[in-house]
């Protein structure tokens, strides 16, 4: 096992061997790019109640998140091959440019429809940031050292979890929610400048046939399934013709996608990947964890601001324990993988912690203390920190070198699909439960049955009405956390089937003049 890596004296140092300076610069610039993409998710979270109160209603809240996730999911598989065809450096520039264009348009939005549309444009750019950044890492970092690098990237997500809600809440309170999108523009400029300086072009290109038919079938299937999940039982009855039509379209397009992939010269997702245990299991874990995480975390600011009466800035501060859990767990996991080359136990620990944390969140009431709430979030954060960096590193190590980019993109795609469906389904469930709970609240009609509530509106209501609304929000959010807990337990069962392939300590690390993916 160890003999396949290097001679005995050199086996251990490979795990901690210093990276060349240019590689470190690439890692830092990529971390900043990932911070840009993840910051957009978190900076919006604390402003959502204010946004929906200004532009429309709470029933549209999930689509502000879903539009971004769905668009990035559909775009992600294409970016890997576009990077090979035109150079990863060039495609990252395109991806960031599209993301920043979407950000500017979101900031100018005047209606909920415009905001959702422009969030989709953002997602089309954001999907490339995740895939291309992680593919570059696979090109320049030996497998056994990727765990520590993934810990750095998880730290970028953790930093965004702190900065995002705070900055978002601050902009909402002193200016307007429009500025949370404009904030992306200078940060994006800095990220692009750093990446351009550290990752130089080489002119190396790989000719590909882009599987446009497969991409179209996948897009139709995912969009139909997300619409069915979001609208069914809420805006549309489950048995209505539009609902049945969406479900049928999702199934037909999904079947067509697999038929196309089996015959495509270069499929978006090579079906041979599903023959690998690591790919199958990590993709399923990513899907389930994405649904649990994105679906549940979206509603925490709503609980804090509407049920607890916290300001946007205060709700951002109260999410810091979640960040602490992610940051601590991801760094410990990265060091563990770098030292041992193993990862099997880590998803088991992460999914157990995630399930327990979600179960604790079902105990929330409007009177839950800050310390108790913080402890609940720490368990959720530890779970997230033990899952996502680990499954990405595992699948990159197990995939054949020529399929690393595709396997990475596909793994991210399944996580994003889970998140998209989770947010849509939980949003529909929350909206219907909220509508039922608000039916008995005096004066609910004056605030759109609860759907036009924001922190400012809430402050103007009598205390008794605020208490009833707080109870309604809490009751509406509990089923979300119960389902997220069940999903985490399902993921835990799947994780016991994960095959462990020891991470290699040494890999091809190109010199600056030989960098891949110029």
Image: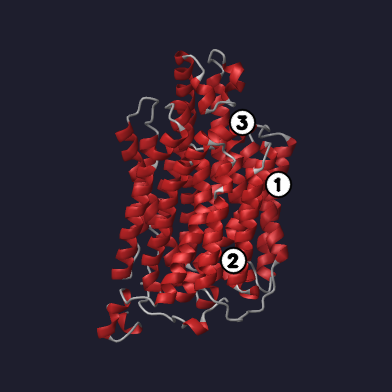
| Crowd band around label 1 with a 10 angstrom C-alpha radius: few (<14), some (14–19), many (20+) | some
* Residue under label 3: 54
Classify the position of the C terminus by image quarter: bottom right
Q: Position of residue 71 (x, y in %)?
A: 63, 52
Q: Nearer the viewer, residue 238 or 25?
A: 25
Along the polypeptide, which appears first: circle 1 or circle 2?
Answer: 2
| Crowd band around label 2 with a 10 angstrom C-alpha radius: few (<14), some (14–19), many (20+) | many
* Residue under label 1: 248
Along the polypeptide, which appears first: circle 3 or circle 1?
Answer: 3
The quarter of the picture where residue 273 lies is bottom right
Residue 234 seen in render: no
* Residue under label 2: 92
Q: Dot 3: what SS?
A: helix
Q: Position of residue 328 (x, y in %)?
A: 32, 54
At 33% from the left and 44% from the top, the residue drawn is: 378
Residue 30 vertical position relative to residue 350 in the rendered view, above or below: below
């Amino acid at each position: 096992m160890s003999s396949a890596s290097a001679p005995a004296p050199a086996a251990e140092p490979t795990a901690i061997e210093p990276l060349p300076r240019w590689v470190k610069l690439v890692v830092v610039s990529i971390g900043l790019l990932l911070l840009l993409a993840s910051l957009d998710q978190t900076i919006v979270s604390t402003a959502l109640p204010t946004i929906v109160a200004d532009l429309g209603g709470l029933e549209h809240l999930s689509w502000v998140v879903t539009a971004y996730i769905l668009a990035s999911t559909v775009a992600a598989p294409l970016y890997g091959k576009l990077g090979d065809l035109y150079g990863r450096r060039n495609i990252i520039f395109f991806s960031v440019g599209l993301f920043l264009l979407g950000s500017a348009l979101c900031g100018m939005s005047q209606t909920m429809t415009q905001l959702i549309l422009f969030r989709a444009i953002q997602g089309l750019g954001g999907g490339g940031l995740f895939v291309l950044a992680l593919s570059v890492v696979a090109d320049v970092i030996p497998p056994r050292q990727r765990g520590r690098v993934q810990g750095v990237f998880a730290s970028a997500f953790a930093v965004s979890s702190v900065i995002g809600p705070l900055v978002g809440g601050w902009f909402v309170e002193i200016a307007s929610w429009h500025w949370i999108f404009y904030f992306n523009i200078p940060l994006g400029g800095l990220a692009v400048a750093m990446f351009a300086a550290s990752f130089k072009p080489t002119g190396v290109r790989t000719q590909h046939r882009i599987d446009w038919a497969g991409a179209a079938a996948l897009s139709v299937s995912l969009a139909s399934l997300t619409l069915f999940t979001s609208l069914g039982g809420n805006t549309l009855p489950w048995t209505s013709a539009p609902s049945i039509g969406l479900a049928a379209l999702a199934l037909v397009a999904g079947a067509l996608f697999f038929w196309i992939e089996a015959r495509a010269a270069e499929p978006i997702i090579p079906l041979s990947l599903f023959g690998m245990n690591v790919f199958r299991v990590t993709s399923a874990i990513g899907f389930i964890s994405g649904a649990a995480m994105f679906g549940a975390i979206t509603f925490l600011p709503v609980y804090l601001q509407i049920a607890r009466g916290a300001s946007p800035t205060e709700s951002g501060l109260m999410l810091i324990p979640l960040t602490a859990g992610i940051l601590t767990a991801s760094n410990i996991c990265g060091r563990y993988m770098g030292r041992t080359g193993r990862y099997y136990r880590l998803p088991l620990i992460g999914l157990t912690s995630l399930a327990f944390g979600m179960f604790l969140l079902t105990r929330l009431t409007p009177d839950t203390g800050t310390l108790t709430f913080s402890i609940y979030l720490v368990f959720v954060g530890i779970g997230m920190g033990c899952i996502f960096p680990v499954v990405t590193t595992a699948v990159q190590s197990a995939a054949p070198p020529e399929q690393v980019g595709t396997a990475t993109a596909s793994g991210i795609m399944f996580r994003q699909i889970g998140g998209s469906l989770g947010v849509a389904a939980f949003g529909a469930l929350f909206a219907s439960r909220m509508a039922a709970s608000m039916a008995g609240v005096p004066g609910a009609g004056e605030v759109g049955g609860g759907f036009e509530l924001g922190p400012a509106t809430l402050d103007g209501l009598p205390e008794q009405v605020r208490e009833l609304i707080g109870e309604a929000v809490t009751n509406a959010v509990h089923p979300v956390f119960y389902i997220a807990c069940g999903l985490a337990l399902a993921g835990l069962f799947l994780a016991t089937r994960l095959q462990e392939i020891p991470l290699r300590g040494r890999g091809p690390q190109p010199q600056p003049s030989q960098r891949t993916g110029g």
